[in-house]
Structures are given as C-alpha cells and as structure tokens.
Image: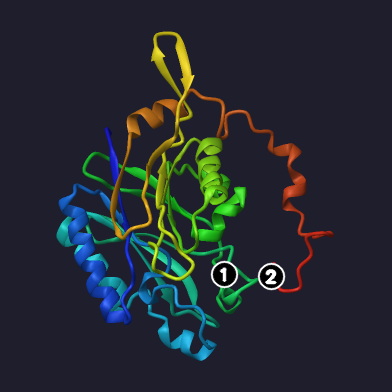
Amino acid sequence: MSEFRIALLQMLPKDSLEGNLQKGLEWCRRAKTMGADLALFPEMWSNGYAMEQPLAALQRDAVARDGSFVQAFGELAKELEMAIAVTYLEKYDPMPRNTVTVFDRWGQEALTYAKVHTCDFGEEQNLTPGDGFFTAALDTREGPVRIGAMICYDREFPESARVLMLQGAEILLVPNACPMEINRLTQLRARAFENMLGIATCNYPYGQPDCNGHSTAFDGIAYGEIRPGVVEARDTLVIEAGEAEGIYLAAFPMNTLRDYRSQEVHGNAYRRPSKYSLLLSEAVEPPFQRQDARR
C-alpha cells in the first residue's frame, strides 16, 4: 500500500445541528475531490463543542449513534466510496458521551470510540467517559489499514496510544478542540515516535473559542536511510496547518511505515511489561490528588 490519505477538516461550526450537518457533508465531498481515503472532523462536530451550557441543554444537544445526523455520514461514505470519521455529542445514559464514529467506504460502521479521558476539571465532568480503546481494520482501495482513535485530552496520557499500538494500530485519528501549541504538538510527535505509528489530528481553526487550527499529521518514521548503510534522523511531521479554515491533506506512506515498524527498536519490540506493574495501581498520592477526578 503506497499511501493512506486523510483529509483534516479544519472548519468553523455553524450555529445549528442542521447547519453542521450540511457543512460537514459539503466538506466531505470536497475532501473526496482532493483524493482523500478518509475525512476527519474536529472534536464534537455535531454541536461545535458547545459545552458551556446547563446539563439539560447539553442532553438536548446530544444525538443518537443510530440517528439521522450520524447515519447521514455513513450514507455519504458509501456514496463517495470514502471513509468518514464523524464526531458528535452522543446521546447516552446517564450522561452524553464525546464520540467519534468511523464509517468505511462501504458506509459500514468500522469503529466507534468515546473519549476515555474526559476533562473532568471542566465542563466535561458532565459527560460519561468511554469504556476503553479499540482498533479496527479499515478497508481502503489499496488494502486494509488498522486504525484507532483518541480524542483531544486522551493524547496527554501515553497509555492511550500505547494500548492502541499493542492492539496493532497503524494510524490514530485524533479529533481535537483546544489551542495547539508547542507542548501539545510535541505530545503528538512523541506518541507517534515511541509507538511507530501515524497520528492525524484535526482541530477547529482560529475563530472557534479556545482553538487556533494547527491540525497536524506525524508519520512516526523517525529514521530514514539517506544512502546504503547510512541512516539519519528525519522529521516525522507530514503536515501542519496554519490557523485558517481549510482542508489539509495528509498522506501516510504505509509501505515505508510498515517496513520501519518491522525493523526499528520502538513500539513493542523491546518492552518489559513485567516491570510495569505500578502502572495498574489506582492509588493517587500527592501532589496529584484532585477532588473532581473520576476513576
């Protein structure tokens, strides 16, 4: 497989569910004309990540996974023969979830993931956290790609990408809604490097509150042969958008990535899991204790 092309839909939301539906459908069509294999939305596209509202209003904003908003993108995926990763505030009991559903190019649901690391220090304390990390083999014209997903704050926990790598993920999809500055970009670069996988992040552009664009893709290939027998460090950055609204196409070199993963020293090649038992402890000691944290 030569390339897996992901369109990062860095766009401003409209002021209604219907408006976001129509704009989302239109931009997916544009992504198809650009040659995308998959179109990726920013975080919680259904309501433009409008979290600063009473719980009752938030619950009214939520849409069903099998409802018309989400399923419209499944129908479009089939029409365009292009995968679509649509994000939404999911109707869920007892409280909504922050969710992404990936439809494959046949319009079938390939993966649904709900944000595990909800921002409980803010408005997301009113959401139900997801119950785990999952991967799926996504069918493309050039063959299957194993994908996984993280959402925004998930990237700040190395365990998120690590467990997805251990499930075989090659590419991680990361919807986002926050300022992407050097430290957060460095986290994404590190997650790609240490797990030898590609990461595609789609953020809202400047103009959306507390967002600034800078959607990115990293291919995780940290070293490359510049001539026979000579290997040199390389920049894993595939693309970094600016602040403006737009569609940014990231092409991941899958054959090169797979060859790299079969030979290099990161990922699961030399781990020693028997030494990591403390990672499973639920004890929280100072200075990390927080009253609003959920376990």
Q: Residues within 10 Å of mark 2 (few under 14, many from 20)?
A: few
What residue is at 46 percent from the left and 29 percent from the top?
Answer: 261
Q: Position of residue 115 (x, y in %)?
A: 52, 64
Seen as rendered, the residue at the extreme right is: 286
Which residue is outermost to the top?
Answer: 229
143 sits to left or right of 51? left
Secondary structure of residue under mark 1 = loop
Please, is residue 56 above or below residue 211 in the view? below
Residue on which the image places disc 2: 294
Could you tell me if the residues under marks 1 and 2 are in contact, i.e. CB atoms within 8 Å?
A: yes
**Which of the labelled discs sits on residue 31, or is there none?**
none
Question: Within the image, what quadrant is residue 190 found in?
Answer: top right
The quarter in which the N terminus is drawn is: top left
Q: Nearer the viewer, residue 243 or 216?
A: 243
Q: Say which residue appears at 45% left-offset and 31% top-offset.
A: 235
Q: Provide residue 278's location: percent of width, then percent of height.
A: 77, 48
Q: How would you rate the neighbour count of disc 1 (Cα within 10 Å): few for under 14, some for 14-19, many for 20 or more?
A: many
Residue found farthest to the bottom: 56
Mark 1 highlights which residue?
Answer: 129
